[in-house]
Amino acid sequence: MSHTKFLTRCLQLATYANGRTSPNPMVGAVLVYKGQIIGEGYHHRAGEPHAEVMAINSVQDQSLLTSSTLYCSLEPCAHYGKTPPCSVLITESRIPKVVIGCSDSNDLVNGKGIAHLKSHGVEVVLSENPAAFRELNRVFFCNKDLKRPFVSAKWAQSIDGYLDRLRTKNERATLISGPLASLKTHQLRATADGILVSAKTLNWDQPSLSTRNYFGRNPRPIVLVSSYLPDESALQKLSSPPLFVGNAAMLEGDKIVCDPQAIEHWLPKLLDFGIHHVLVEGGGRVLQSFFDTGCVDEWHRYTSLHTLSSGIPAPDLKLSGTASNLGEDCYERG
Ligand code: AOF
Ligand code: ZN
């Protein structure tokens, strides 16, 4: 019998906790007896029971477990973390068969859960399509596989490829994209833990970097300090106290003192500040250097119908993604 139906249900259950499990992954689990679902569960948030525990505990007639199959979207864990190992609960419950969406890249697990099950005589089946299960937790897998935050890049450009006109610090930034693009940006911000801009962009644009046009939390502002120091007036406008990265030794507050150009060096350190997903919003040079370093996992581009003829160039890239209309702007992501 195909396992797709029950594994798909695991994915569905996992997403019930979308946005609430960080730094843990979203995980769903289903128990099936003679083709019927007899128990379901998902991981609600970090520190709380894992999906397998929720599913096993939800089964009314526990005597059926010894003849049931457990489906789970992620390899059952093997470690004592905030909760005891799921793989041990499975073998102690004498569940004979486990079907798994994808393995867990966490160094504490990474095959050890599967090995524990097999060594206790459990039949283990791995999904033929692990990509679908990894995609669900792409932030988690990026953190565990690459040991750095997941990076989204976002910018708005004129149709002729400029982020802004050339202007002085006292002149306001050029409004490129429309209100729907702004709404979409705030939706995107609500999914990130941190939002990164250069000190120059901070000083010149004086943004709040908040999620005010959408529900959800504000990501923490991250200010990249290279040649410019952040202005006190600009810092006051931020939604919350920022994390400084770069030439920040003399700045008060949380900071990572490092060479700001060495992205690969300091990016992993953001994890120590609970930044598992960072949204890079500018300026142009910062966006370009993130792309040049190969550290962009996902990008969002809004292109307006306006022309600027000259100005600050948008990232120079050969990108292909999916495109849609967003009011007067074209929205592409990839
Ligand atoms: C599972 N089922 O539902 C989840 C798993 O701190 P802990 O004890 O909650 O462990 C967190 C780690 O456990 C997390 O990094 C990931 O490797 C795994 N998450 N495992 O068997 C679950 N959420
Ligand atoms: Zn577990």
Image (cartoon, rainbow, N blue to C red):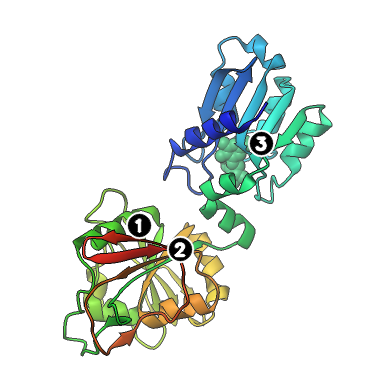
Residue 153 against residue 187 in the figure, above or below? below
Badge nearest the viewer, 3 or 2: 2
For the point 24% across and 62% down, the residue is 182
Q: Quarter containing ligand 2?
A: top right
Name which quarter of the figure residue 206 lies in.
bottom left
Answer left or right for 19 relative to 119: left
For the point 71% across and 15% down, the residue is 67
Residue that badge 3 annotates: 100
Q: Earlier in the sequence, mark 3 or mark 2?
A: 3
Q: Nearer the viewer, residue 125 or 195?
A: 125
Q: Indicate yes or no: mark 2 CB to ligand 1 under 8 Å.
A: no
Q: x, y (%) of residue 251?
A: 38, 77
Q: Earlier in the sequence, mark 1 or mark 3?
A: 3
For label 2, count other residues whose C-alpha is less than 10 Å away and answer few (under 14), some (14-19) or many (20+).
few
Residue that badge 1 annotates: 188
Asked if residue 82 can be seen in this view, the reply is no
Q: x, y (%) of residue 209?
A: 28, 65
Residue 96 against residue 291 in the figure, above or below? above
Looking at the rendered structure, the kind of residue marked 2 is Gly
Residue that badge 2 annotates: 334
For label 1, count other residues whose C-alpha is less than 10 Å away and answer few (under 14), some (14-19) or many (20+).
some
Q: Point out which mark residue 254 bears.
A: none
Name which quarter of the figure residue 127 lies in.
top right
Per the model, the C-alpha gap separating discs 2 and 1 is: 14 Å
